[in-house]
Amino acid sequence: MSGDDDLRRHREAIDALDREILERLSQRARHAQAIGRLKEGSGAPAYRPEREAQVLAGIAAANPGPLPDEAVGRVFREIMSACLALERRLSIAYLGPPGTFTHAAVARHFGSSVEGLPQASIDDAVRAAESGRADFAVVPVENSTEGAVGRTLDLMVASDLSVVGEVKLRVQQNLLSRSPTLADVRKLYSHAQSFAQCVGWLARHLPSVPRVVVASNAEAARLAAGEEGSAAIAGEIAASTYGVPVLAAHIEDDPSNRTRFWVLGRQAVQASGHDETSLVMSAPNRPGAVHALLGPLAKHGVSMTRIESRPARNGRWEYLFFIDVTGHRSDPPVAATLDELRERAPFLKLLGSYPAAPDP
């Protein structure tokens, strides 16, 4: 058999498989529509974070290759996004404008079949979900290089929203510019955190170029797109959104740089089997109080993955402690820990239990 015959045989097989995939997708979509009608009658929410997490985990476990788990996960994320849109198209508020890393987090978590609602600030994104203008909000909460996003933590103390999901995004910073070479760059725009994440690279390659701090990486890309001799530090989604070429890729100092985002909403999330619980509490103003509050975690064998302190903003030099633990609030060890903490802490608020996101 000739090479042309082999090529034709493989292409015919692919065409047949594509038609089979399409038929299977249509069958899946019809089942999703039927589920949507059943949910409508019962008042159940259209979006179930724990169910989607279970589906994606199951697909990864069953993946025979040769496609990597991440690629297969992206395909199934889009399938679920499109099927959910047949039931109800979700609206997602996020820290904008389009092209920010938060915008990329929305796409990673919800897929592309949602309505994105870019907001000017974290406060605006949270208010959009609180008021019902958006079904959910996606906001940054932590960066592996720069630490916690204080404004998000402060807002969650009083907000009636809960954490219903999380997204972990590999943050790859790029230098975007229409200038042909680094020597032609005369001004550099970016967000303050992005400048901080690229200090070493900038010192080596653009030490004397003036830096202008703007509200977001996307805004930096927009400015660089229309101003000769300027450049921006931003992600690939901003480069694509504003049509600015990547002059230098992956310029972040820490190659493991990651940002974590919270998905905020109103619904309770059931256990997925691989969950995380976030809470905030205060400690009595006496020696050893914080250590005493952490005692129930050790007693019940609950693993703490993060603790962050923030001023209580009551003018009394008191602090709040934001804690993430492994497990769902309905898991007996976590439930027992929360019961003890409620007795010991002057203030305790459960921020949410939600499926833990895989590391990117």
Image (spheres, rainbow, N blue to C red):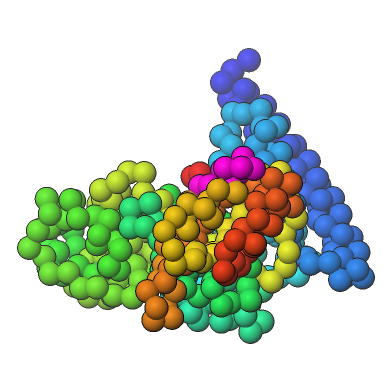
Which residue lies at the image location 47% right of the left edge and 52% below the top edge? 291
Which residue lies at the image location 38% right of the left edge and 51% below the top edge? 144
Q: Out of 353 and 139, give the one closest to the viewer.
A: 353
Would residue 232 appear left or right of 106 to someone viewing this image? Answer: left
Would residue 340 appear left or right of 230 to someone viewing this image? Answer: right
Confirm whether the magenta stretch covers residue 275.
no
Q: Out of 272 and 182, give the one closest to the viewer.
A: 272
Question: Residue furthest toward the top?
Answer: 1
Question: Residue furthest toward the left?
Answer: 208
Which residue lies at the image location 33% right of the left edge and 61% below the top edge? 234
Confirm whether the magenta stretch covers residue 299.
yes
Which residue lies at the image location 66% right of the left edge and 74% below the top edge? 135
Q: Estimate the x, y position of residue 174 in percent, counting from the top left.
A: 30, 55
Q: Estimate the x, y position of residue 110 in percent, counting from the top left.
A: 62, 60
Q: Estimate the x, y position of residue 45 in percent, counting from the top left.
A: 79, 67
Task: Report the span colored magenta.
Answer: 297-305
Q: Is residue 12 visible?
A: no
Vertical relation: 270 (above or below) 87: above
Q: Is residue 69 visible?
A: yes
Q: Out of 107 and 243, give the one closest to the viewer.
A: 107
Q: For residue 72, which quarter of the picture?
A: top right
Looking at the rendering, in which quadrant would you find the N terminus?
Answer: top right
Would residue 316 appear left or right of 336 to someone viewing this image? Answer: left
Vertical relation: 246 (above or below) 216: above
Q: Out of 104 and 269, give the one closest to the viewer.
A: 269
The image shows a total of numbered marks equal to 0
